[in-house]
Image: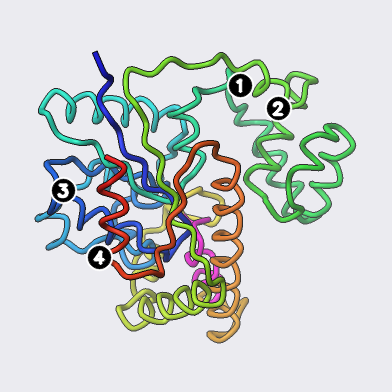
């Protein structure tokens, strides 16, 4: 018997992934499953470009608003949750549409997970304190000495991945790369159809990113972050507050940046995120590349042909 199809809609931020998923849902009996490490958090709506309440009511998204911003979420958590949602959709004869920009989650679901050592809270605290004093470029230099493979792969400001790679090498004496190389091939019960929305015009993507951030400001993004800060239990050390845009707005509210500096840094950080997303996607073998800047009807027709 043929395996049931599962559609992946991947792409950089502001490339129109959600719009395409909603159009598909109008054409096909389906279940939308979010693949986004920011949309999981409740109370983080504007800065994550989360679909509004009316849209979510009409087009329910699984794995949206499932955690408080104080909580952490791993790729392993995502694989377990997404697998459950996919199986449920298949049992109901609906097409699972996985849509988002967290490419690590897509890869973990498709390829399986390396058996990495669990995080050590004490070591993590020590590394964060060291990074606060020396800066992440210095931590990157330390990683390059201990783990040249990871040092060559990671950028000096990629704090989250630098921290994890340092944790692994300090805990085990091995590069995190070697754990991934030992990763067992995963046999999936579904047939993945990977679609990649890859804008052909980089300048237009950058324009969209800037417009989207300015729209967030108009919608009350500053007030959203002020409310999160007022809780008293959140800080920039949490993964939720390290999301693009939130860190820069937090720093503005702390008086570390002017409003203009915060805007510019947030837009630059979003561009950098989009570049990393596209780099990951280019390495995805067999992905069907579509230009989201084309006519939306053509894009929908091209997508429907794949399923």
Mark 1: few, some, or many residues within 10 Å (few <14, many ≥20)?
some
Mark 2 touching mark 1, by CB under 8 A?
yes
Judging from the image, what secondary structure is the residue with disc 4 in? Answer: helix
List x then y, in percent, for residue 111: 50, 25
- Label 4, label 3: how far apart the Cα atoms are: 23 Å
Which span is picked out in magenta? Answer: 241-252
- Label 3, label 1: how far apart the Cα atoms are: 33 Å
| Sequence-earlier tag: 3 or 1 | 3
List x then y, in percent, for residue 239: 50, 48
List x then y, in percent, for residue 101: 44, 51
- 63 lies left or right of 139: left
Judging from the image, what secondary structure is the residue with disc 2 in? Answer: helix
Residue at label 3? 60
- Label 4, label 2: how far apart the Cα atoms are: 43 Å
At 31% from the left edge and 26% from the top edge, which residue is drawn? Answer: 83
List x then y, in percent, for residue 273: 56, 59
| Sequence-earlier tag: 4 or 3 | 3
- Label 2, label 1: how far apart the Cα atoms are: 8 Å
Residue 225 numbered tag:
none
Residue at label 2? 176
């Amino acid at each position: 018997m043929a395996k049931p199809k599962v559609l992946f809609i991947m792409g950089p931020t502001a490339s129109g992934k959600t719009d395409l998923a909603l159009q598909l849902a109008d054409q096909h009996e389906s279940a939308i499953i979010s693949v986004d490490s920011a949309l999981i958090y409740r109370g983080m709506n504007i800065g994550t470009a989360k679909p509004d309440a009316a849209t979510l009511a009409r087009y329910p998204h699984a794995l949206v608003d499932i955690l408080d911003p104080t909580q952490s979420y791993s790729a392993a958590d995502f694989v377990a949750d997404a697998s459950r949602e996919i199986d449920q959709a298949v049992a109901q004869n609906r097409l699972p549409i996985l849509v988002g920009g967290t490419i690590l989650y897509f890869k973990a679901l498709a390829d399986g997970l390396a058996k990495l050592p669990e995080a050590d809270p004490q070591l993590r605290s020590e590394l964060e304190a060291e990074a606060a004093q020396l800066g992440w470029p210095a931590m990157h230099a330390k990683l390059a000495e201990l783990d040249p493979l990871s040092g060559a792969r990671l950028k000096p400001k990629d704090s989250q991945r630098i921290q994890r790679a340092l944790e692994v090498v300090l805990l085990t004496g091995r590069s995190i790369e070697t754990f991934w190389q030992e990763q067992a091939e995963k046999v999936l019960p579904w047939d993945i159809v990977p679609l990649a929305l890859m804008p052909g015009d980089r300048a237009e993507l950058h324009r969209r990113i800037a417009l989207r951030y300015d729209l967030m400001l108009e919608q009350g993004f500053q007030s959203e972050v002020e409310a999160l800060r007022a809780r008293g239990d959140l800080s920039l050390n949490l993964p939720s507050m390290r999301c693009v845009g939130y860190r820069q707005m937090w720093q503005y509210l702390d008086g570390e940046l002017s409003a203009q500096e915060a805007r510019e840094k947030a837009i630059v950080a979003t561009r950098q995120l989009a570049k990393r997303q596209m780099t990951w996607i280019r390495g995805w073998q067999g992905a069907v590349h579509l230009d989201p800047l084309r006519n939306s009807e053509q894009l929908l027709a091209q997508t429907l042909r794949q399923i």
